[in-house]
């Protein structure tokens, strides 16, 4: 039995394929869209009996060609991107092989799967809404496939699909909230592990200035309590200790060292960070922070690390302590050597200046103050467009150009401190943030990227110094946009970015509202993982014991299913005429009294039988049965309400139980 | 051995069905009469969901979880939609006419709905093709099904399978109904030369010329009986006020023919009955009166549709139970 695919179903299938493919197209080569158009056209021509199905040779050739095309465009045949691409191509080519409704079913199932894979690449609200729409279309295509061939009613299919999806939502919500979030069964290659815009593990002059052109979001942070002032918020991402004469870079060996126990002196400040996917595993924290989130490590330099690179948004909670000191007990010999390391040559003028300062100031703190004073007193200029620097970058910056962005100031200062014998390192991260007054959280963008210096001082341990503050205090206090107002270079390369138009108030408020929605989406939906689920259970069910939770959840699910089944499956109530329904109602009421209607019994006989048993009700009985006979047999002017009224009066006066003066047969016998 | 067990199982199943859904001319499908299980497509869909769930777990992706659970809930919703698409359908058999063995017996059926619309109901027998019908809400859908016949006698029908997979194809809900169609199957006609004008021995019917109404020779008048042709009414007598009379004509009588089972030659009883059937049809065509003689049964010679049907019925049911 080979049924054909009706035209109506084919139209649904083509629409479904198109909507499912659209979100994938931007990631894929352009010819995919052309190929789909070709396949769709071919299939339509097959339906019109103009063209035939492709032969076996063409099909095998097509498969080989797919493999080749994927290999050429992705460079591999394994890995998630290549797999999804193969899946998409099969999805499209299946059109040309789709003969029976069963093949069409395969296409629709593949469609569901492809909708799911799109979520691995993007999880924003717009995509989620769009994929909901795609699901609806796919379900409608399924309905179209089941409709009888004679029926050509796409609107009915869509309506039915909509009703079914709406009816599925309650159970879906319960399952979403209560299905246990398990740990990954095996490790997978997560898309987006490749690095994106953001900090890198090394810092050369102009690196951060480039980053400052990006309006992308780095992370959001919410505080328990008052949001501290922006100028105190130095978000540390990593420390750079190695210097090769031009580039400061991260020292991998840091990860092997054991972190000193955290210092918890002073007031605690609790905050939750939702980091955007970076493809890296460093996290952002205030100085002196510890995190209670399980997948977060603390390193020896007091920074936080995620166990896995951030492929999606990642939420963690941390607590900062205001008076925490880092390594006040001193540095080991190897540490000291590492934090003083400089290349053997280069920047002679800066080294000479460092020697001069060392001779001038006995204490390290005084020396540092002198360096900072140099930045504020000399005509340094804070700019996103620094002049290019030559071989002795620090010399040229400090004594010639004096134009630079934060990495120039921090790099030069760390160099001078090391040359003067003070252990120093660069800290990169972000500074400040934009308050979203609607959601009460801070937005930290890529253009908030910053670099500053930490120097080790006896007694206080590692202490932060920000040379940029000496040059451009507005940057620290009011952000980059204010600092670059004169220069006009803020987000000059991103003219369409919303963050650039913060001056336009209605636009800005729209932007912040949208961001708030996204933030809630990320926190409450995308990051709904096992910890969040457990917290929810504790809050609602008052227990974190899996056995009890399991019982409660199963009870909940089954109750919901039973209620739904009851409403959907109860038999159609309104059958027969009003008179017949009244008859059945009276029958149900009288059956316990042993006076139910007998098979083949007419109304008058029944009336007489009841009347014998209940002589006191004779009048009411007569009223009801007269009305019943008139309506059931005379037809015409049937007044259902009148009959109901008679029935109601009669039923109200009937005895509840058999014993109430009824002749009970058993006793008579 | 295993064949015997299978036959026992089939018997048991048939008996169980008869108790659960007794044969009736009119059947309303409800929870007692509907069976529902996931279809192959539904099982495939569950497999797909399992894969998606593993993906959601491995990629820790909330939205994939969300999609998986939406589809799983949809599966649950589809169960009820499929059930409801079948529940409440009323099937009513509207008689069939007799056929000769080997022909397709036409069986009238009316599907009606009290409230809901019922879409894509598939009606089928294992032996016969598939019909897909829609029943409009509160309306009726009449159709004629055809069932192949092989043997004479009352047609024994398999139960009609009424199935639906609408709306998503993930479940099949079905019922097996016996609508108690009464269809008589006449023997398969076999064409043979007519027997010589033989009469069964000991019969006096040779001389007894049955009066057969013909068209040629006017014989007389008879009081009008309902059913008499208007063309044969004696209008003149009526206009004279003598009441309504029919004219009666006599045909030059051919000798009427007795058809006897013993004179029919064939390999077996069935073929001989087939030969008799062929004679009945031939004589009816030739408008020649015939009588039927079967062991234990005699039908006096006559002509006309009613006589033809009586004879064919006798042949169809010869040696069988007269009632179903």
Image (cartoon, coloured by chain):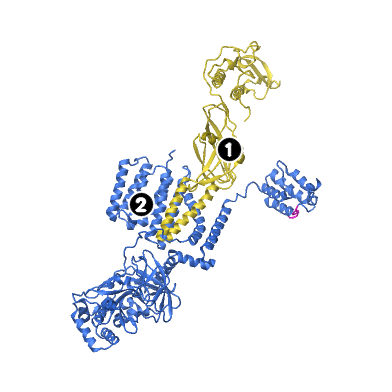
Relative to the observer, which residue lies in front, A642 or A209?
A209
- Please provide percent x and percent y for residue B110: 57, 39
Image quadrant for the N terminus of chain A? top left
Circle 2 is placed at which residue position?
A87
Relative to the observer, which residue lies in front, A171 or A624?
A171
Q: Residues within 10 Å of mark 2 (few under 14, many from 20)?
A: some
Q: What range of the chain is rendered magenta? A: A652-657
Q: Residue at x 48, y 45 (%)?
A: B39
In the image: residue A36, left or right of residue B125: left
Q: Quadrant of residue A200?
A: bottom left
In the image: residue A112, left or right of residue A585: left
Answer yes or no: is residue A140 visible: no
> Which residue is the extreme one toward the front?
A333
In the image: residue A666, left or right of residue A211: right
Instruction: Measure how far apart labels 2 and 1 are at the Cα level.
Output: 49 Å
Q: Secondary structure at mark 1?
A: helix
Q: Quadrant of residue A629?
A: top right
A589 above or below B304?
below
Circle 1 is placed at which residue position?
B12
Image quadrant for the C terminus of chain A? top right
**Drawn colour of chain A?**
blue
- Please provide percent x and percent y for residue A464: 33, 80
Q: Is residue B189 magenta?
A: no
Tag shown at residue A564: none
> Which residue is the extreme one toward the right?
A668
């Amino acid at each position: 039995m080979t049924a054909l695919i009706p035209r109506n179903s084919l139209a649904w299938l083509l629409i479904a394929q198109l909507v499912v493919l659209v979100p994938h197209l931007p990631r894929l080569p352009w010819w995919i869209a052309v190929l789909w158009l070709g396949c769709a056209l071919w299939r339509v021509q097959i339906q019109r009996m103009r063209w035939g199905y492709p032969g076996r040779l063409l099909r095998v050739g097509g498969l080989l060609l797919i493999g080749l095309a994927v290999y050429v465009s992705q460079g591999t045949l394994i890995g998630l991107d290549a797999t999804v691409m193969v899946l998409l191509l099969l999805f499209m080519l299946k059109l040309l092989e789709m003969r029976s409704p069963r093949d069409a079913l395969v296409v629709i199932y593949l469609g569901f799967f492809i909708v799911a894979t799109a979520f691995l690449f993007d999880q924003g609200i717009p995509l989620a809404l769009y994929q909901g729409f795609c699901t609806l279309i796919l379900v409608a295509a399924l309905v179209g496939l089941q409709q009888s061939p004679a029926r050509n009613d796409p609107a009915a299919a869509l309506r039915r699909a909509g009703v079914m999806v709406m009816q599925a939502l309650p159970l879906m919500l319960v399952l979403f909230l209560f299905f246990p979030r398990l740990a990954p069964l095996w490790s997978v290659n997560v898309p987006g592990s490749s690095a994106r815009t953001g900090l890198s593990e090394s810092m050369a002059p102009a690196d951060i200035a480039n980053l400052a052109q990006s309006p992308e979001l780095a992370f959001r942070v919410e505080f328990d309590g008052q949001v501290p002032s922006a100028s105190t918020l130095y978000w540390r991402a990593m420390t750079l200790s190695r210097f090769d004469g031009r580039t400061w870079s991260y020292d991998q060996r840091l990860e092997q060292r054991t972190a000193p126990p955290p210092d918890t002196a002073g007031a605690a400040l609790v905050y939750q960070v939702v980091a955007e996917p970076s493809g890296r595993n460093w996290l952002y924290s205030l100085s002196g922070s510890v995190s209670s989130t399980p997948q977060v490590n603390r390193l020896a330099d007091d920074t936080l690390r995620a166990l896995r690179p951030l492929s999606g948004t990642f939420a963690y909670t941390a607590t900062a302590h205001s008076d925490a000191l880092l390594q006040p007990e001193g540095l080991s010999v190897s540490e000291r050597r590492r934090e003083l390391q400089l290349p053997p040559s280069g920047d002679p003028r800066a080294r000479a200046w460092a020697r001069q300062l060392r001779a001038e100031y006995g204490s390290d703190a005084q020396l540092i103050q002198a360096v900072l004073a140099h930045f504020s007193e000399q005509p340094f200029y804070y700019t996103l467009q620094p002049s290019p620097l030559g071989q002795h970058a620090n010399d040229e910056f400090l004594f010639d150009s004096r134009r630079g962005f934060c990495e120039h100031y921090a790099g030069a200062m760390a160099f001078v401190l090391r040359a003067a014998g003070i252990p120093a390192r660069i800290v990169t991260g972000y500074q400040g943030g934009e308050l979203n007054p609607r959601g009460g959280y801070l937005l930290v963008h890529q253009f908030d990227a910053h670099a500053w210096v930490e120097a080790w001082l006896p007694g206080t341990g590692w202490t932060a110094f920000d040379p940029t503050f000496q040059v451009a205090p507005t940057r620290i206090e009011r952000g980059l946009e204010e600092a670059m107002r004169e220069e006009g270079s803020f987000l000059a390369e991103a003219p369409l970015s919303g963050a650039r138009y913060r001056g336009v108030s209605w636009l800005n408020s729209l932007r912040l509202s949208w961001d708030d929605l996204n933030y809630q989406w990320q926190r409450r939906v995308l990051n709904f993982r096992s910890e969040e689920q457990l917290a929810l259970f504790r809050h609602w069910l008052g227990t974190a014991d899996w056995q009890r939770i399991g019982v409660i959840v199963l009870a909940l699910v089954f109750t919901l299913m039973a209620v739904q089944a009851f409403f959907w499956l109860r038999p159609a109530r309104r059958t027969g005429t009003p008179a017949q329904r009244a008859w059945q109602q009276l029958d149900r009421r009288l059956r316990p009294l042993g006076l139910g209607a007998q098979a083949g019994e007419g109304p008058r006989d029944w009336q007489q039988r009841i009347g014998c048993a209940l002589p006191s009700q004779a009048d009411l009985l007569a009223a009801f049965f007269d009305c019943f006979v008139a309506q059931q047999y005379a037809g015409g002017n049937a007044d259902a309400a009148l009959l109901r009224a008679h029935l109601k009066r009669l039923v109200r006066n009937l005895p509840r139980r058999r014993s109430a003066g009824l002749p009970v047969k058993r006793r008579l016998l | 051995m295993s064949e015997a067990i299978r036959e026992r199982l089939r018997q048991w199943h048939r008996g169980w069905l008869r108790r659960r859904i007794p044969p009736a001319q009119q059947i309303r499908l409800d929870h007692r009469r509907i069976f529902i299980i996931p279809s192959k497509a539904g099982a495939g869909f569950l497999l797909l969901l399992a894969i998606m769930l593993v993906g959601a777990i491995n990629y820790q992706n909330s939205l994939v979880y969300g999609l998986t659970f939406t589809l799983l809930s949809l599966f649950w919703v589809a169960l009820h939609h499929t059930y409801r698409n079948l529940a409440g359908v009323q099937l009513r058999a509207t008689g069939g006419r007799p056929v000769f063995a080997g022909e397709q017996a036409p069986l009238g059926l009316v599907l009606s709905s009290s409230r809901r619309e019922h879409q894509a109901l598939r009606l089928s027998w294992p032996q016969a093709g598939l019909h897909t019908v829609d029943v409009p809400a509160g309306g009726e859908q009449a159709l004629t099904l055809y069932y192949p016949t092989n043997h004479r006698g009352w047609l024994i029908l398999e139960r009609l399978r009424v199935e639906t997979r609408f709306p998503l194809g993930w479940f099949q809900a079905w019922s097996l109904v016996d609508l108690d169609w009464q269809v008589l199957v006449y023997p398969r006609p076999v064409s043979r030369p007519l027997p010589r004008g033989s009469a069964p021995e000991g019969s006096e019917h040779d001389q007894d010329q049955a009066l057969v109404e013909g068209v040629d020779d006017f014989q007389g008048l008879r009081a009008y009986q309902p059913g008499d042709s208007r063309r044969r009414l004696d209008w003149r007598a009526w206009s004279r006020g003598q009441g309504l009379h029919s004219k009666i004509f006599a045909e030059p009588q051919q000798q009427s023919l007795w058809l006897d089972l013993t004179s029919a030659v064939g390999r077996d009883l069935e073929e001989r009955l087939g030969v008799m059937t062929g004679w009945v049809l031939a004589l009816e065509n030739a408008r020649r009166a015939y009588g039927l003689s079967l062991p234990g049964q005699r039908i006096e010679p006559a002509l006309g549709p009613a006589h033809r049907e009586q004879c064919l019925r006798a042949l169809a049911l010869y040696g069988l139970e007269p009632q179903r």
